[in-house]
Image (cartoon, coloured by chain):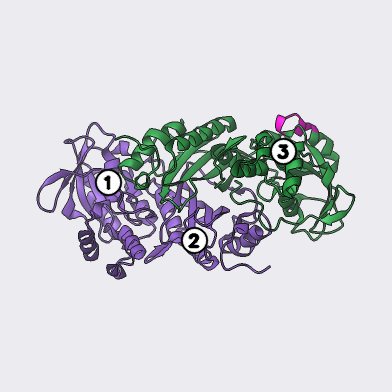
Chain colours: A purple, B green
Amino acid sequence: MKSPERIILEHGSGGALSRQLTEEMIYPILQNEAYPELADATAFEIRGRTFITTDTYVVDPPFFPGGDIGTLGVFGTCNDLAVCGARARFLSLGLVLEEGFPTADLRRALESVRLACEQSGVLVLSGDTKVVPTGKGGGIFLNTTGIGEALGDHYLSVRNIQSGDAVLVSGPVGNHGLAILAAREGLKIGASLRSDCAPLFPLCEALYGLGRELRFMRDATRGGAAAVLNEAVSHSEEFGLEVDETAFPISGIVAAASDLLGLNPLEIANEGVMIAVVAQRASDEALSLLRSFEAGREACQVGIVSDGYPGRVILETAVGGRRILDLPRGLLLPRIC
Amino acid sequence: MKSPERIILEHGSGGALSRQLTEEMIYPILQNEAYPELADATAFEIRGRTFITTDTYVVDPPFFPGGDIGTLGVFGTCNDLAVCGARARFLSLGLVLEEGFPTADLRRALESVRLACEQSGVLVLSGDTKVVPTGKGGGIFLNTTGIGEALGDHYLSVRNIQSGDAVLVSGPVGNHGLAILAAREGLKIGASLRSDCAPLFPLCEALYGLGRELRFMRDATRGGAAAVLNEAVSHSEEFGLEVDETAFPISGIVAAASDLLGLNPLEIANEGVMIAVVAQRASDEALSLLRSFEAGREACQVGIVSDGYPGRVILETAVGGRRILDLPRGLLLPRIC
């Protein structure tokens, strides 16, 4: 039985062609010692407190400078565990393929999943593949659900945040969203834009070593830094954030492209940048730790937690004004991750 | 901010409208004591050997007689754990919504998730919502990843199967696939067809009590009974199955509709039927156990594991012939689950 060059509906039938796709392509790429056979469910052992997170990736285009839907699907979900103080151990992988999707592209995405898993020290334990008719899907959608083990007893939460704490950003913002936009629209400026898609676990593990002086971390994905900064304080009746717009590391190309397109880099999605809130006295140590990693080389403090403006993020702007930095409204760009 | 009556792209932006959808609709419906706040990942504790499984549901239409994508998403994934000898405990829920999908339908599907979770004793711990533009999705897709705890040390696998074992089916086949087909195509015959979508855990738990005499269980979803029977023996060089076509419980309406449409009920998807392989000496006890449940009322033995025809399923047909029952080829129907 020859394998078609494009996905056809029968690949999702549960019959002979489904089995061929699974047994001859998907499983051989993802198989590992913890996933010894194809079954309805796979057993694993994990000690102590465990974390779970889920994310579906619908990024368009699925391949872009700096990564693809496979790397994103692994790093993105592992990052969600990392910022909660957990080491990713296992993943499930759910594919929704659109009829007509090239099987070579599926193989390429799966190879990226495998490499990103190796780099992250995680194992795929369960998979599922569905096929939808042309016009009912977006080429490839990929869900990963991640299982991780807690690094320790310290539970990170916005509830730990205290007035006077320092607000840090781990690296330059805006690269992922603009790289996707440029790749999708074929913008000339795109040649020098690359997604920052990267594992944040090493940075998060280092900060976790600060103990209770680390309050909260979150990766700044959809909605960008603006969304995370707001999430950090929006439920508080006690404090808000004061943030310095000029303090954020932003590359020249991102600044230029954002300016040209009328976008705010603080609202643009990232895939390798996190916001951390730490006790002010731990800020220098936290920045040293972050800067010891390539992905954190440009880490810096961008603001403080303040008693003024409870529940709000106040931005000191480049031109010297002060304004509320709200949750992004409208939509920059669909299918960013 | 008024909530739109239909999903718009901004619901997936990560900004204000994303947050409104999550905080005002999705989370209030699914919230539970183990999911106390919206964070990137949620902690849980589970003892001993743990199982994971994942499934994406793309069923069309999402609401059908006997169930909907919400019930299917919970029962389907819990059933995958159950047939491996595990009790489902936790679920993640990943939604991919198409721009224009009615928010009332989303609410209805989520209410079904909640009810099915209550019925199954599982808790949602993590969620994610993406929105794709019109023409890039299928209304609603739903991924659930399930975490379950092992019922005991006995590991169920096709490798346990021995020559002479009995092959049981837990209930009448063909209802789910035909109900979906009838609902999608508006077939008149559909009025009396209902999906069999139901939790199999109680039946699986009862059979698990048989100990080593229970060899293997699998729910007969995509590809129907034919796919599961083949999976049970396709890798064996020692034995095959001999199965009696007339022994399968099939309702009058399924028999009539299959005949009319030229479909083989053994190849049609089910969502509340499993195939179990048990030692022949345990067959009567297993059938008694299954029949003590409503979903297993019509359970019966349909075949035996035999030394002849290794790797093959041999069907004794209604007209007295014998033929190979292969994995289904071609495609009955896309988006069946």
Q: Residues within 10 Å of mark 3 (few under 14, many from 20)?
A: many
* Circle number at residue B208: 3
Name the residue rendered at 21%, 65% in the picture.
A252
Q: Residues within 10 Å of mark 1 (few under 14, many from 20)?
A: many
Query: Marks 3 and 1: same chain?
Result: no
The answer for how far apart the CA atoms under marks 3 and 1 are is 52 Å
Position of residue B10 measured from the top left corner of the image (x, y, whole percent): 34, 46
Q: Quadrant of residue B201?
A: top right
The answer for how far apart the CA atoms under marks 1 and 2 are is 31 Å
Query: Marks 1 and 2: same chain?
Result: yes
**Dots 2 and 3: beta carbons under 8 Å?**
no
Position of residue A248 measured from the top left corner of the image (x, y, whole percent): 21, 55
Quickly name the residue at label 2: A113
Q: Which residues are magenta?
A: B288-295
Q: In what element is the residue under mark 1? A: loop
- Say left or right for B146 vs A233: right
